[in-house]
Every structure is written in C-alpha cells, then in structure tokens.
Image (spheres, coloured by chain):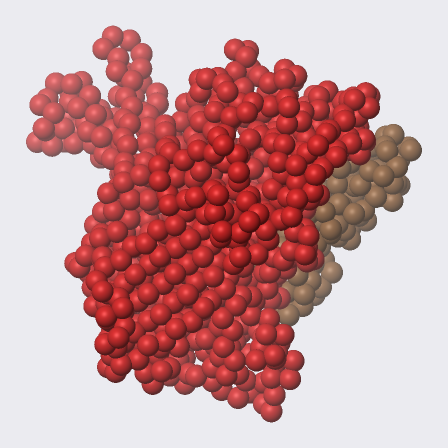
Chain colours: A brown, B red
Amino acid sequence: MKVKITVNGMLYNKHIPNDMMLLEFLRKYGYVSVKRGCDTSNCGLCTVWVEGKPVLSCSYPAARADGLNVTTLEGVKEEAASFGRYMTAQGAEQCGYCSPGFIMAVLAMRRELTDPTEEEISNYLAGNLCRCSGYAGQTRALRAWLNDKPWEKEGQA
Amino acid sequence: MNLRYVNQAVPKLDGAALTGGKGVYTEDMVPRDCLVVQVLRSPHAHARIKSIRKDAASRVPGIACILTWEDVPQIRYTLAGQSYPEPSPYDRYILERTVRYVGDPVAIVAGRDKDCVAKAMRMIQVKYDILEPVLDFETALDNPIVVHSEDDYFHHFDIGGDQKRNLVSSGCDADGDVDAALASCDVVVEGTYYTKANAQAMMETFRTYTYLDHNRRLNVVTSTQVPFHCRRTIARALGLPKNMVRVVKPRIGGGFGAKQTLVSELFPAIVTLRTGKPAKIVYTRKESFQASNSRHQMRVHVKVGAMKDGTIKAVDMHALSNAGAYGEHASTTIGLAGHKTIPLYARQAAFRFSWDVVYTNTMAAGAYRGYGATQGCFAMESAMNELAEQLHMDPAQLRLMNLPHVGENMAAYYNEPLTSCKLPQCIERGMELIGWKEKYPCVKVDDHRVRGVGMAVTMQGSGISAIDTASVTIKLNDDGYYTLMIGATDMGTGCDTILAQMAAEILNCPMERITVDGVDTDHSPFDTGSYASSTTYVTGMAVVKACTELNEKIANQGARRLNIHPERAEFDGDKVYDRTNPETSITLDKLAQDLVVGEGTQWLTATASHCSPTSPPPFMAGFAEVEVDLETGETKVVDYVGVVDCGTVINKNLARVQAEGGIAQGIGMALLEDINYDPKGQMVNSTFMTYKIPCRTDLPEIRVEFQESYEPNGPFGAKSIGEVVINTPSPAIAQAVYNATGVRVRSLPITAEKILMG
C-alpha cells in the first residue's frame, strides 16, 4: 500500500507492505535510534511519538501513521542531548540500548505532566524497561533535569 | 596518592553516542544486501530426526540456502567462551540429528528478506522420532534416558563427568574432618535451598552479521563479551584455519554473562561461507528466552555447625546443578557455589563442598552475573540466618565474629590469602543505613501489614586466578595523543572509560588525549574477554603496566633529544625536561612529531600483559526491608541498602550504577523471575509478560555506599564490582520475609503464594 508519513519533518511517500510496523519503517529509512527489545510491546525501547504522543512503534502499523507526523530521537536531537547529559552525568545510560526509547518517553512526559510527583513519574515511565541500571541513576538524572529546567533556558517548547 | 581521574565520577566516553541514539550497535551496521538468517527449531524436548524435506522450501523465491544436519561439519565444540583448553565438554554440533531441548536448531534458513525466510521455514517438513525427555534435574542422574550418548563427546581434561549417567561434572573439595566437627557442635542447622534458571534478559538480544572480505576471510561482527574466544570457536566449529576468522565487537546492549556463550555467531557464519554473501541473524526476544542460555538452576543442601558462642566449626555443602541440554559453563559455575560462599565462614571451621552437574532436556544454562556464587549465596546466607536464630544471636553479629581476617590464607578459597577486606565496616555501615537496631526483626505497620528486615553478606572474585589474561597496547601518536588498545569488551559497563581513566592518571594527561580502541581481533591485543569480574582488576593492571612503560620510553626519547642522561629526564605529561635544569625541555607535541618523521624516528608503543595468580574478593553487605501484606502475601521491597568493598572505586558513578543494577537484578531473582517448563519440556516463559523483570515501580530506592579497602595487587588498589552486587538480595529478602511473617521460603522466587501457603 501507499503511505505518506512525515518523519521529523521530512515527508516519505512510500509503498509499504500492509503488515509493516512503524518500527521497521523507521529503521528502514535510517532512524536507527529506534530499537526493538521484545516482541510483545512490553519494553518501551521502540518508543517514538505520533503527533507528539508516545507510541510503541513495534506494534503500531506504519499504515496507521499515514498522513501523520512521527518524531524519533533524531528529530529532537538537541533536547535529547540536553537530557542525555543528565543521564551521562550519572552513568545511568550504561549499555544505552534502552536510552532512546526512555528519553522519548521522558520528553513526552515533560510536555504532558506539570510538576509530576515521584509516583506520577514512576507510573508514566513504568513501561520503559532497563536491565542495567536498576533505574536509580535514571531517577537521579530526572530529578536534576526537572529541577534545573534547562528547556526554559534553551527556549525549547 | 593525589588522583586526578581515578576515583572520580567521569562520564562514559561513549555516553553521548548512546543517549543520542547513534547507530553503534551490531544491527545498526548491517550491510544493505545482507541475507536474513533464521533458525528452524525443535518443537520436541528430545527427538531424533527421521527425515527433513526441504526441496519445496528451497524453491521459495529469494531463498539462498537451507542447511540441515547433513550439511554442516561434524565437529564437536563448546559454545562456552572460556580460555583454551576449555573446561566445558565438547558436546555440540552446529546442527545435529538428535535434538535435546525445545529450541535446539534443526535447520538454518537464509534468504533475501524475512518474509521469504518465514515462508520457507513453514514449508520444511521434518519427521521426528519423539523420545522421552528427562526434564527434572533431581532425577536426571542415572536416569535411563540419556541426554548425550554420542561417541565423539570430548573433554579436554577430567571434570568428573560421565555422559552415560547424565553427569556433566562432579567433585569434592574439603579441609578437615567435617563429620567429626559437626558432631562436636552445640548447634547444627540444615536446609535445602532451590534457585531457578533466571534469564539474563539484556535489552539487546543476540545478533551477529558476517561477510567475506577481500582476502576471503570470514568477518564476524557480533554482540559478544568474548571476541577472542569467539574467533577460536568459530574457526573450530566451521573447520577453518584460525587466521581466516576476524571478530569485531561494536557497542553491546548488555550481556550479564549471556554473551559469554556463542549463541548467534555460527548461523550467519556458515551461511556466508556457503553462499559467499553477507548474512545476519537477529534473535527475537522469544528466541533469546527459549534458545540461548540462562543461570544454572540449583538445589543446594547446606549443613552448618557452631558452638554456643557463635563460632562456626563446620560447613558442609552439596550442590546439584542443572546444565540443561549442553554443558557450557557447567563445571565452573558449580564451583563458585561453594568457593565464593564457604570462605566467609571457614576461618575456624572444617568444610566440605561437593557437587554434581547433570544434563536434562531443557535449555542449556550458561553464564549469568554471579555465576554460581549467587545460587550458593542464597543457600549459605539463608542457612547462616537460620543458624543465628538457633543461637539467639543477631545475624550481623554472627557474621562479624566469623569473617576471615586480612593476612590469613583462606583454605576454602583455593588457599589464596586475603589481602584486603572491609566487610566488617560494610556490615556496620549497612546496619546504620537501614536502621537495623530499630527495625530488626520486624515492625507492624497496621493490622495486616508488617515490615521485616533481613541481611546477607557475600564475596566474589576479581578474574579467574592464573587464567584470565589481558594485554594492552598504548601508542603515542604524532602530535602527542594516545591510543589505548584493549581486548576487553565494554558491554555497557563502561570499561573503556575506566581503563582510559587509569591511562590518563599514569600518563598525567587529560582524558581527551586518550582514544580507546576495541575490539577487533585483527588488531586488538589478546584479552580473554569481559567476564568473571576480571576487567577492572586484570585488564586494569595491564593498562598500568603498559602506560608506566610508555612513560619511561617517552622520558628516554626526550633525554636523547635533549642530550642528557636518561636518569636526569623527567616526563610530566606535557614535556620532558632536565631535572637538574628544568629550562632544558622538549614538549610532548614536538617530541611525538619528531618520533614519527625524519631521521632517528622511533614510533613509541608499549604493550603489557597481565595475569594475576590470585583473585582478590570484593565484598558486599546487603540489607533488605520488605513490607508483607499478611492477607494476600504480597511482598514489596521498601528499602535496600548495599555497602560494597570493591577496593578503590575507579569510577564513582559507574561503580554505583553497577551496584544498583546488580541489586535490582537480584531483587528480580528473589521475587519475580521464574522460568518454568510444561510437562513436555516447552519453556512457558518467553516474553516479558510471562518472565517478569523488575520495572521501576517494582523497586525501592536502592541505596549504595562504598567502604574502600586498598587491594595491593590491583590497579590503584581496585578489585572488581560487576558480579558481587547481585548476590545478597535473595537471602536478605528471604530473611526479611521470615522476620515479617514467620514463613521461611527456601525455594526461589519468593511469591505471595509461597508466603500464604506457609
């Protein structure tokens, strides 16, 4: 089938197999930040945004994104790098394989929740698994980042 | 010593690339025209293949090759990534007519894309003679069903196995008369403890791609912890000369031991050899659960005897381990169950440690962080907590009065001397942090919820004594920057960074001047790989040696150019100068440039190898506080404190995250992670829905502190950190649950059902 999908502002006018998932579509066109960690929508590694809302691209048919705007980590590079520095300041990225999906969820959370409590944060991000860190370093990075609000200084949305 | 880089919280060198989503992992680098490889696997736990029909499947458009047992070399090998000669038996073929577990490979299918491969997989017709499997490891020994009856089964050396008895390995290690010592004790406790076959569950599943280069050599790019062992085993299994194989390790998405076994490498490798084309395999999560390796399931029986005052006089342990269908890491993991637990209590005690490892028709076990010590720790530390209760002693006090002392030989630890230990301080600090005095044994929260606390201590090693070997080359490049070449494998742990910290410290230069290069078996120096908690301690020492040597070479070359006696030359990191006349100097930039161009050039490199005769143990004390709902049995860890002695902490952040992550995995093992098989031998946990690893709402805020001892044999006084941190949660949580409820769970995981059923 034919789809028109906008990825990070660039329009892709493509023929795709009907059963292609958004994850495969994105990786095919070079958005390699998008990782697959499971087959059952449990790990959060493949988190991207469709119209600004986080979705699991492994189980989101590419066809559903027809006519929509998709954002991957590559599309929010500077904001991701800004939060990424809080992660690396804690050593919390470890193997890094879950980092892009986690960061996309964190940036979405920042847009969605105002002054979230610890519990709200934990629940919002519960679907993003990490096997290396035990999450503690991620939490420290998040606290520091939410506290500093660098996006205000950097004039981001 | 005034340290600038070591003992600091230096960010990981690759941190920006990893958090920036760069394409630095194996699958991100696959060539575009790569064949897709998938493996058709046995649906039966034990069977003999009668026939395979693949002609129709082969005609599916896009299929490049389909290989079955008749098409592969009949060469026995082991997939365990261990130093040659491997202790693991050679009990595998790439494909074999007999299949030994649900998931054993039956056919390798390669094609243009996943769709044609999937179609061909469905069209392959396999007829099996279905055999009765042996699934229960407690009945496997001397069972009439024999898992390995092949006559080319091979051992490099005797590990106490007997394939006709399903026995992979057995043995006994003892000191003193245990039976007499037990008979003379005031109190003896005895218990049998069970641990499960946990999945390592690293976020990046197994994956490999292969291609032939311009010299027709097989290039293997793979997510591995053991590139050099990979090279050797791939060459053997495929019948190739070793010089025809090159292995490259890119960034790794976690390993935890799983990638110390060659899981995915051989399938694309043989496809590339047969077709001449690049080939890739990417394991699904299901395959990673069902057809790779796991922690060894164990049953550990412990008998401990003590005098009334708490002096432990006898420790008797027998461990039975389930190797599964193949013997990777079987004889070595079992050793750690006793060798890394008994020494904590054998100071004044006779001990006996005996073991059996058996084959069954379940997935082969392998290496998983802790490597047997974790299983042994659950048993031994649980027994110690039970002993403390019998003695009416505080369990912390029981430990404090029996621990080994620095300077003593540890008979139960390969007779190695204890050269550094701050475990007593770890225990005392942990008690303060958790609030032991106020909370032990339990505090009632309300009419149906109780909070209990529990503790455990543990030790691991730092590399394998006299075996693990690391080589390092440091090069001075033109313009005065360095390349640190290592064969150790950063799998997310940050070893590239901590080794660069050590190099910067010795070369007295900013971290930015050091580029870390690894791992490519064509140019990296030999390293046994990153496992057995070896990298900081063993490879770290090779870095110290190589950089010290390069310092001297730079000073000597500077002296030549300054026309002074080498003994007068001093290198301060930026320049070489005359100690008696500091005005006479040459900058490193100038010297480095002069050394590579023109007359009298001498490109400077230093290579050093290191192998330690001993494996100094790191230690940890773990304290758990749990809240149990007495009406439902629901248990939540509300606080966990880990205090670690890993010697000098090389990187404060990375050591801390290692500890927090290890504790989190340990909590998963204690409460959640539960691999099970159905009666026909099909693993029922193959997704993150059925195999639950901790997510952030399952964990407390894990609190970690360090009590740094100084290990005289380690680089900058360091020992290891990677594995010791996973061991304490199971016994500490089991004890906390007991203190809250009076129910002692001796079989992991500790579920609500087990607590409620008593």
Residue for point 31% across, 39% down: B467
Farthest residue in the bottom direction? Answer: B447
Which residue is rendered at x = 32% and y = 25% of the image? B476
Q: Position of residue B289 (x, y in %)?
A: 62, 48
Residue B601 in view: yes
For the C terminus of chain B, the quadrant is bottom right
Q: Is residue B155 left or right of residue B687?
A: left
Q: Quadrant of residue B115?
A: top right
In the figure, B59 relative to B81: above or below?
Answer: above
From this viewpoint, is residue B15 visible? no
Closer to the camera, B47 or B555? Answer: B47
Q: Above or below — where is A83 with respect to A13? A: below
Residue B646 lies in quadrant: bottom left
The residue nearer to you, when weighing A93 against B126, is: B126
Q: Position of residue B675 (x, y in %)?
A: 61, 57
Residue pushed farthest right? A1
Left/right placement of residue B532 relative to residue B566 reads right
Q: Is residue B313 above or below residue B668?
A: below
Residue B188: x and y, percent?
A: 33, 77
Residue A155, compared with residue B326, is above or below; it is below
Residue sitting farthest toward the front: B144
> Residue visible at 60% across and 71% down?
B751
Total numbered circles? 0
Q: Position of residue B296 (x, y in %)?
A: 50, 52
- Taking depth in this image into account, of B195 and A85 the one nearest to the observer is B195
Residue in the image at 59% along x and 39% along y: B206
